[in-house]
Image: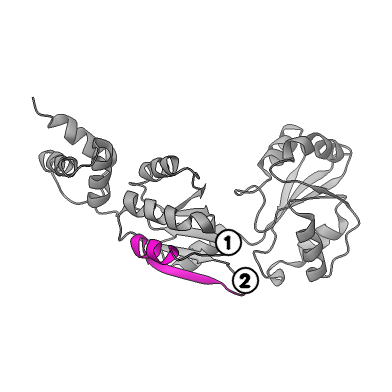
Amino acid sequence: MTGRLVLGGAPLGQPGDVGPRLREVMASADVLAVEDTRRLHRLATDLGVTFTGRVVTFHESVEQARLPGLVAAMADGATVLLLTDAGMPSVSDPGYTLVRAAIDAGIPVTSVPGPSAVTTALAVSGLPVDRFCFEGFLPRKQGERRSRLASLADERRTMVFFESPHRLADALTDAAAAFGDAREAAVCRELTKTYEEVRRGGLASLAAWAADGVKGEITLVVAGAPDVAVSMGPAELAAAVAEEEAAGATRKDAIRTVVVRTGLPRRTVYDAVVANKPT
């Protein structure tokens, strides 16, 4: 008899945010694969749950080693509950590898849906949420981070990022350079917890605020590029790029600046520069 994999949505901060189904599965699961065993015991105490299943750690440094045993257990009929520290497993947290392995082995995968920092931050950000994209964690290295943000300069959808508190100021500064100082954003800190804070404003002002130091779990929501682009012809776009270059910017950075300023697609600006190249 084949078992199943259950993805459990853990509370972001308040234990009362989860429903009775998670309690039931925690109590009945044969195996609980968890990111942090201490958090599991704390959550069980908060929820008044007594679990009897075997507990195994499942985090980034051990997940590959744990896969064969967990898949074998499910193949033998066990129900495996996967819990991360907060939110839904596999959303920038351990879980994707186990989900993929279970699917490949023909094992049913289901969930007990629960809180998500992505949708919670979107809801309270005050930014448009009819269309959005989730970009996970930005690269740690500055050059890679700037390159990733530059590639998103003409993204029209609202963007959601996870960020470490000690890298937040640098990330906001780089985002301001890529998207423009005034691009609206919201820094959502410690969602649902005692010291919850949502700071809204332009990217440059948020970067200045974060420079003093920020603590806690951070979800960053950034407005997409303007839907209405500035009307400029190819010659004007090329001249705008040339002006940025004359001020010391590289061709790549100059094009990026004009893209942010006008809201036009990067390809449009690039083609204008090529078409108006001096002969």
Decide whether residue 61 is among the magenta residues.
no
Would residue 63 be seen by someone viewing this image from the given angle? Answer: yes
The residue lying toward the viewer, choosing from 143 and 14, is 143
- How many numbered discs sit on the rendered protein? 2
Question: Element under label 2?
Answer: loop
Q: Residue furthest top?
A: 279
Cβ–Cβ under 8 Å for marks 2 and 1: yes
Q: Is residue 19 left or right of residue 164?
A: right
Q: Which residue is mark 1?
A: 217
Say what amino acid the circle numbered 2 marks.
Lys
Say what amino acid the circle numbered 1 marks.
Glu
Q: Is residue 83 left or right of residue 50?
A: left
Q: Which residue is mark 2?
A: 193
In three-dimensional space, the C-alpha distance between marks 2 and 1, rounded to whole angstroms, equals 10 Å
Quadrant in the picture for residue 236: top left
Q: Position of residue 99 (x, y in %)?
A: 70, 41
Q: Residue furthest right?
A: 52
Q: Position of residue 141 (x, y in %)?
A: 47, 42
Q: Is residue 272 left or right of residue 223?
A: left
Q: Residue at x 75, y 46 (%)?
A: 58
Estimate how packed mark 1 is, as few (under 14), some (14 to 19) or many (20 or more) residues with alpha carbons within 10 Å.
Answer: some
Q: Position of residue 117 (x, y in %)?
A: 58, 60
Looking at marks 2 and 1 on the same chain, the residue that comes earlier in the sequence is marked by 2
> From which residue to which does the magenta span run?
193-211
Q: Is residue 120 left or right of residue 114?
A: left
Question: Element under label 1?
Answer: loop
Q: Residue furthest left?
A: 279
Q: Residue at x 30, y 58 (%)?
A: 181
Would residue 131 be seen by someone viewing this image from the given angle? Answer: no
Q: Residue at x 75, y 54 (%)?
A: 36
Q: Quadrant of the C terminus?
A: top left
Estimate how packed mark 2 is, as few (under 14), some (14 to 19) or many (20 or more) residues with alpha carbons within 10 Å.
Answer: few
